[in-house]
Image (cartoon, coloured by chain):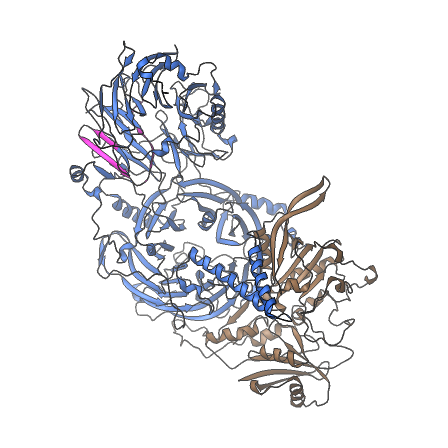
Chain colours: A blue, B brown
Amino acid sequence: MMKFRFRRQGNDPQREKIKQELFAFNKTVEHGFPHQPCALAFDPQLQLMAVGTKSGAMKIYGSPGVEFTGLHRDAAAVAQIHFLQGQVRLLGHFLDIHVCVCYNVCDVVSSASRVTVLLLLRSCDLLCVGTEGGGIHFLDLPRLSLRDNQSLLLDQVMQSVPEDYRCGKSLGPVESLQEHPKQPGKILIGYSRGLVVLWDLSTCNAEHMFLGKQQLESLVWERSGSSFVSSHSDGGYSVWAVASGNTYTHQPVSSSIPYGPFPCKAINKILWRTIQSGGGMPRASYGDRHCVTIQQDKQHVTLDFTSRVIDFFTVHTTDLEHDYDDPKALVVLLEEELVVIDLLTTGWPSVPPPYLAPLHSSAITTSCHLDNVPAKLWDRLAAAGNSQGAQPGVRHAHGSWPICGGKNLAPPPRQQELLLTGHEDGTVRFWNVSAVAMTPLYKLSTANVFHTDCDPNDDPLDPTNDPEALQEEEWPPFRKVGCFDPYSDDPRLGIQKISLCKYSCRLVVAGTAGQVIVLGLSDEWSDHTVDVSTVDLLQDREGFTWKGHDRLEPRASPAPFPPGFQPLVLVQALPPASVTSVMLHAEWNLVAFGTSHGFGLFDYHRRTAVLARCTLHPNDSLAMEGPLSRVKSLKKSLRQSFRRIRKSRVSGKKRPIPTPTSKIQEANAALADQEEVAPVQRRIEPRSADDSLSGVVRCLCFADTYLRDGTHHGPTLWAGTNSGSVYAYALEVPGVGSGRGRPGGEGSGCVEAVLGKEIQLMHRAPVVSVCVLDGRGKPLPEPYQASLDLATAPDMTNPHSVLIASEEQLKVFSLPKVGAKTKFKLTAHEGCRVRRVAMVTVCSTAQEDYSETSLVCLTNLGDLHLFNVPALRPQVRYDCIRKEDISGIASCVFTRNGQGFYLISPSEYQRFSLSAKVITEPLCTVELERPLETHIRSLHTNTSGDTHQQGVIMSGSPEKERMRELERAHLNSHRTPNRTGEVLQI
Amino acid sequence: CFYVIRNPERNSLFEAEYRRFALKMSGTCGFQEFYRLLQTVHHIPGVEVLLGYADIQGDLLPINNDDNFYKALSSANPLLRIIIQKRDVDEPVVFATNSLQRRKKGLAGLRPAQQKAKPGLMIGLPQDFRQISSIIDVDILPETHRRVRLHKHGTHKPLGFYIRDGVSMRVTPQGVEKVPGVFISRLVRGGLAESTGLLGVNDEILEVNGIDVAGKSLDQVTDMMVANSHNLIVTVKPANQRNNVVPRASRVSAGGNSSSGSIGSAFSHDSAPSTASQSVSHHSNSNSVAEGDSDEDGDGDLIIETDSLPPYLPHRCVSNGNGSHRESPLSSSLGQRPLPQSMSLSMTTPTHNGSPTKTSSSQESMREDGNIITL
């Protein structure tokens, strides 16, 4: 009935065309580290690396900027990935092929014998499938058709096994399949019980048998094919010589348990690479750590990781003529990060990866995006970041990334973009998100502003400082590698809100214990004490006792602060509740912050508090119980249900003849009613004023606008709360317009704040955002933008207006007299609630200079609505995030040019674009020598149609659990007469 | 404690007289005494008058017995607006929900002559009358459906119902289909929904304030209802189809608008659908749409201007923090208020009070009052 309102607008063909030129929704690129990776593959010819995840995503990486992503339709876990070497056909029908493999294998192999290993021959025309039952099946590629009658069953093998070895027991599952490095068509088959068979595919004949007795884990060929290494579940490994002549070998050439003699865990994977110098062999170890050992000659390092090892490979020469492998780098995929060790540089330093950044090295708590970052700030940040990276054990800048397949065709970014992430451990990380590859730029830690239990100064320095000394002292020679560290020293350090002024290089970070830190950028080390102020937000409100955590104790002594952002002032809100909103106005030297109790305004130039305002509702007792927690919401719901019971009892009393028995019956009935409440029921009641947490300050906004009257504008501060209240303060900032903050501005008087208006939204929904619009209906420019001539000056001649977005409605009010002008009742019409709003400016693809400012709303259903301002007419709507993905919706952040980021897992940001023009997506090629298809382009492929030019063979069976059991690995080296081998093993 | 009582007195159709006086709270006794007091104050002894007061929701409610007199006093905070009207047989006062607001918002234009027209039957003097619900749009809806309007603001009762997911049967060209639907799952005892008798358990909800709920999740429908909770219009398909309202052709007159806008069910009196069917309204489609649109929250947001805000001071002048100058939007706000012809209200400015904390106390009483309030 009321829909006629919507039909009235729109459908104007002219307008529709403009909309098409402005808006388009694309999910462009995924930044960060894939969640729950479970498979790794490498194509040495093309220099491409593939990572598969439990959710069925496949990601292919080459040189920086070369990224391909595919998602398996069935979202089944990827158990194994194999490249068809040299053919980019790989990705080709990757989606389909994967499915096929699963199905075909299931057909071939009865359900009793599940797939354990796969071997893809170098010729890429045959896939060997080893099963739990010990059989091996052969599939033709690329069609994956079963070669009938060629399956190698256990019986055939058993026939050739000498009598005394059989002893009635089965050989066990196939544990390893390896192709002979020099003679195609010969494969090495390892069975769990220890038997290793060299099988000739052309003659279907067992050429050689190695009668091992140890339970087998893994096999690897030496490069020449004259020997191989087997690793075992007891933590030992054996070298076997492949001598022609006799068919049976009973004993290995050598065998050792590197971390023995005590019982060791299994070596789950072993690699052996020869290099020209030295000789080596690998070994296993023990403990509950996640380790990989590298050993060469006397050099022996046990890489100690913070998360589980998934798989590893080496980057080495593929030239068959070459006598040695010459490994360049070791790439280890861990559950939470990717670590690359440079094997060419002495000391084996790690190389920072240009992609797959572990965003979540500590949990992400907030984020903030800046576009058009000035070169000055960018360079200083990069310099500060470089000086941070100069730690021992981490190689920087020089030296190239070992995985260099493909070519990045994306043009250099038009502007520098920064994404700031705040973390649970009190750090703020600055990421370069100008292009497809998200790379770390700089890391700021705020922990050293405070005195914490584990003061970094008292900390024994990390062992990487002196690896060699440690190596001599300790056995095994552990070396900590990687940066994933999910443990926070103190949860109060967590960063909740960030605000950065890119022109003045002022940064404000606010955290869980009510701390608000103002920082300035400096290029030099500095030792100073940080000024501390406290602002009591409760003021004279009586009857409230804070039961939550204490405030953080500021450090009393001067602390050394490295180049980068250094703290200037620390403001602590009391009670020390988590900061829920923060806003910086660097031009006025003001910072406003809000918590669940109220908001404050601080002048960091004069270091004085200007204003403290309590927003608590008198009935709101829950706000005092500390940080938001599950316990609390449980408490709340319990309390409410008791209240409801009590209410119904009371209403029962009012009934005509309240006899004692009827009262009891009534109470019982009320209780029974409560119990009947099925989970799918929803109560329909208006929001009431005394809902708890009504005082939470949700948004803050500075604006130079008309609040007092229509002729004189001035600085104002706006604050919106959870209960639909908006407070507008007129600020008296001395010298605004005449350059306060410059030396001459000193002593020019204090900032004053006077309450100008109070708006109570009738529907009492939380205020999500407040934004002042100028006379043309455009948002006011950021601080300094107008005074530095970086943006068109706001229109101060026509009346201003203020846009207040609550969870339920968008509304524009005129200023200075706050009268409703336009509104859009999103919840009443669509049944969704506003979660995030932002003003974005979208450029047209057709006309270079045409752009529109829109309001973008992300709702609790995960869809995006765009409205024009100030008319608030709906423009377009897109589905963006699944509505069940609450953390994704909560983490969403928009850029001013119409892009956005949200977390699709704790470690990955999905980047998307609302603009038809500004799209950041991978654009890259991989050159092929295959005659037919020479080229592939990166496509964003959630549809199989897009991927058909690319190819990967990947296959696997979800049941395969073996890899997941890997706990640790070691590598060891031993000397052989004239060449060196390295073996890596998990 | 003194209460200021504003007191416009209607002498004739076009003249009005305003009085303001203080009344000692402890000194009040009963309605009759108050009635006599008013007659004395206005020097109209012996003249039969009707008393009404504006409650916090902006409704004009009668004062004619002790109960509603005390109720009126208790809602005076700090001002009580009392409207006195000569008892006139030709033109009885219409006490109704939103009676003040409708005029204020000019909605009378959409319902021509509703207020001035003869109100049809008037059954005695209403004791404490406020509309809390109505059945609307009977003539445009299928008989099997019912469109119910709940006025939350007239009462302190909770809306008092729960909704759930369910399966609904729809007749389509392909035959009967099962489709997901939203149903009322429970009525809270003593709640508004229950007391109207217009909604029942297992009624299927088809529309919320004119928006079709088909394809919407339970949470979406919940949010829509909560967002509209102050003026909720739900279209339901009652589970019990025996009490359906049947439009009566005989009542269709040429004007079609002379009847009162809706069927009211009196506060605390169950008006069962059967009684409601006695007087069925006839709205044109656009009328009901306008009604749905005319949500009060448009101007319902309360805006408090603080006069402690100093006027613009020349550059670099530091304000004294609590300026004594004060703008006076009073006149303009008064001017914006379209007053009913038969009544006039005065707006009194309380004594100057610069502290913002005081504003919250008076905002209660002024909530629905106007666009801008100056304190």
**Residue A316: in magenta span:** yes
Q: In this view, does A929 lie above or below B239?
A: above
Residue A906 placement: quadrant: top left
- Name the image quarter holding the N terminus of chain A: bottom right
Front in this rendered view, residue A504 or B110: B110
Query: Which residues, given as a range, are shown in magenta?
Result: A293-320
Residue A781 placement: quadrant: bottom left
Residue A730 left/right relative to B138: left
Q: Can residue A323 be seen in this view?
A: no
Residue B264, percent from left and from top: 71, 66
**Residue A38: in magenta span:** no
Residue A440 left/right relative to B120: left
Residue A865, percent from left and from top: 54, 50
Residue A254 placement: quadrant: top left
- Name the image quarter holding the C terminus of chain A: top left
Front in this rendered view, residue A171 or A975: A171
Front in this rendered view, residue A547 or A566: A547
- Looking at the magenta stretch, what is its main secondary structure? strand
Residue A769, percent from left and from top: 48, 58
Residue shown at the point (76%, 57%) measured from the top left: B139
Residue B311, percent from left and from top: 46, 74
Residue found at the very far right of the displayed protein: B250
Q: In this view, does A265 lie above or below A701?
A: above
Residue A475 left/right relative to A931: left
Q: Is residue A970 visible?
A: yes
Q: How many labels does the image show?
A: 0
Q: In this view, does B361 lie above or below A928?
A: below
